[in-house]
Amino acid sequence: MTTTTKRKKPEELRSHRWYGAKDMRSFGHRSRTAQMGYNRNDYAGKPVIAIINTWSDINPCHSHFRQRAEEVKRGIWQAGGFPVEMPAISLSEPFQKPTTMLYRNLLAMETEELLRSYPADACVLMGGCDKTTPALLMGAISMNLPTIFLPAGPMLRGDYRGQFLGSGSDVWKYWAELRAGNITESDWAEIENGIARSPGHCMTMGTASTMTSTVEALGLSLSGYASIPAPDSRHAQMATQTGRRIVEMAWEDLKPSDILTPASFDNAVMTTLALSGSTNAAVHLIALSKRAGFNLTLERFDELARKIPVLANVRPSGKYLMEDFFYAGGLRALLKQLGGLLSLKEKTVDGKTIGELIANATVFNDDVIRSIDNAMVKSDGLAILKGNLAPDGAVIKPPAAESHLLKHTGKAVVFKNYDDLSARIDLPTLDIDANSVIVLQNAGPQGAPGMPEWGQLPIPKKLLEQGVRDMVRISDARMSGTSYGACVLHVTPESYIGGPLAFVKDGDLIELDVPARKLNVLISDEEMAKRKAAWVAPAPKFERGFGKLYLQHIQQADKGCDFDFLETQVSTTHSDNQKDGSRGGEPEIH
Ligand code: FES
């Protein structure tokens, strides 16, 4: 067992500057804390634990977080800490337009600045709905206080006449059936009422389940907790345990910089691959690694994908849902199956190594969590493509595509933007067939803006009616982790800034070769140069406000879409990071 011998003294706590000093300012801090009904005995000499809570009335995935925050506080009080709940923007995936991704970095900044500007010694981060997980952690990694991420947990399985429904995946599936005329409006309304029937995040292997799992693999959540269904009483118990443990971590001064290493990021990538997790992980994990001072690349994803089997039989690539995954043993059991492929000596917030934590994990259903010998697919949970259409890379999820499309050449049918796509995709006169390649331009980080999850481009109604259910589709957008299909995503550089995707025209032949990792438009270099010379850069999408800041500083997908000024200087060790407090330096606080 790995233990930390170092222990802070009360006067070494960061919050001592607010509460312990003998000056007029600390009088103000104490008197205003008294105003809230607390006595000095409640906080004096105790670690102040910030609970960053992304609850809101418009985030159904976090609708249990008000109660969970109380359960975290219970644990903090029990362990001798002082809990302070701080709300942060919620990033509600189903409601926020054009996309929560536009605001991921805003929540990351808010998290970092809340922790910096208030008397926090350590923090519990409450998130789970897609972008909240990477955003909270990006901010907390930059601030580098002892941190535990508390995952929202998946919602219960959806239900439709006794059949299980999966978030997102079954929406796309039944929407296609409705458009094809195979189900009625009344069936569709029944599905609407049954698909999301409890608190918690999407219960397919979407971005939420992928990211909460990878955070556990990184060692930043308590072990075994990422997949507990949100309404399960064990989820509430986990919240209290998180509260107890974070107080200990504050005394131990066990920070993200003591836990995260290049090998722990490899573990997170391998976890994503074994789960057949969301393509969005390729953006978020790169952003997180750069915050930690490391340089995870798309190429590393591809290297690891060639040797990591897909073991989770969970939709959209498999059959089951997260509730089944939890009952089958959860993430610990899956990591145990990966065994020696992982770096088992990496530290975690539990104070043990990942190897120690998974040593006794058991698989209770080997159809849900497969062994390596009985893997869903032997490798290539994700693949990184390059070529003259994506010089800096593009992403595809091969297990979610019809296999005959993974090596395919077809004529491009190009849409200039999302409005153009919406207006023309179902026109009976559209010149398209099942072998065509649908191309969407201007859907990337700057073009959309915000790189929305538009990448599962719709199949034309007339082809749906003919029984077509998958086609090669290419864009610089992202795709929901709950989506499926032969969708090439994150084409970089994006078309809006003059990436080659901008120059594709109707009728160009496009070659996709996933085994060879190639994505090319079959035109000559001279023709490409001619089209590039004729291209006119579009006007910026925002003239003021956060949008303007976003456009000025957002980086491309292969860099993780972080703002350039928020990245940590990349180093190979953590020695450059400040020992106490933020990586970027903490201003003197008066
Ligand atoms: Fe919140 Fe899917 S809508 S995780």
Image (cartoon, rainbow, N blue to C red):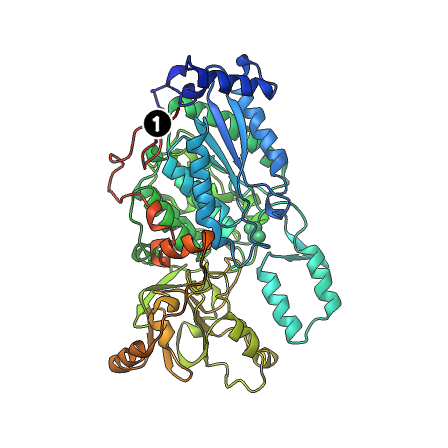
Q: Inspect this view and state whether residue 427 appears.
A: yes
Q: Position of residue 277 (x, y in %)?
A: 46, 54
When the figure is inspected, residue 349 is found, relative to residue 152, above or below; the finding is above
Q: Say if 489 sits above or below 195 in the image.
A: below
Residue 213 is at least partly visible in this image: no
- Would you name the residue on which mark 1 appears? 588
- Judge left or right: residue 4 versus residue 177: left
Q: Is 571 in front, or is 356?
A: 571
Q: Quadrant of residue 14?
A: top left
* Mark 1 neighbour density, 10 Å: few (under 14) some (14–19) many (20 or more): few
Please tell me which residue lies in front, 159 or 307: 159
Count of numbered badges drawn on the protein: 1
Q: Element at badge 1?
A: loop
| 232 horizontally vs 275: left or right | right
Would residue 518 be found to the left or right of residue 30 on screen? left
On the picture, is 172 further left or further right than 447? right
Q: Position of residue 275 (x, y in %)?
A: 46, 52
- Amino acid type of the residue that numbered disc 1 sits on in the rendered structure: Glu
Please tell me which residue lies in front, 49 or 516. 49
Q: Quadrant of the C terminus?
A: top left
Quarter of the rendering occupied by the N terminus: top left
Report the residue at 38% width, 54% height from top: 561
The residue at the point 38 percent across, 44 percent down is: 339
Q: Is mark 1 within 8 Å of ligand 1?
A: no
Q: Position of residue 188 (x, y in %)?
A: 70, 65
Horizontal and vertical percent position of residue 260: 34, 38
Q: Is residue 196 above or below residue 55?
A: below
Determine the residue located farthest toward the right in the rendered image. Answer: 186
Identify the residue at horizontal 63%, vertical 34% (top origin): 67
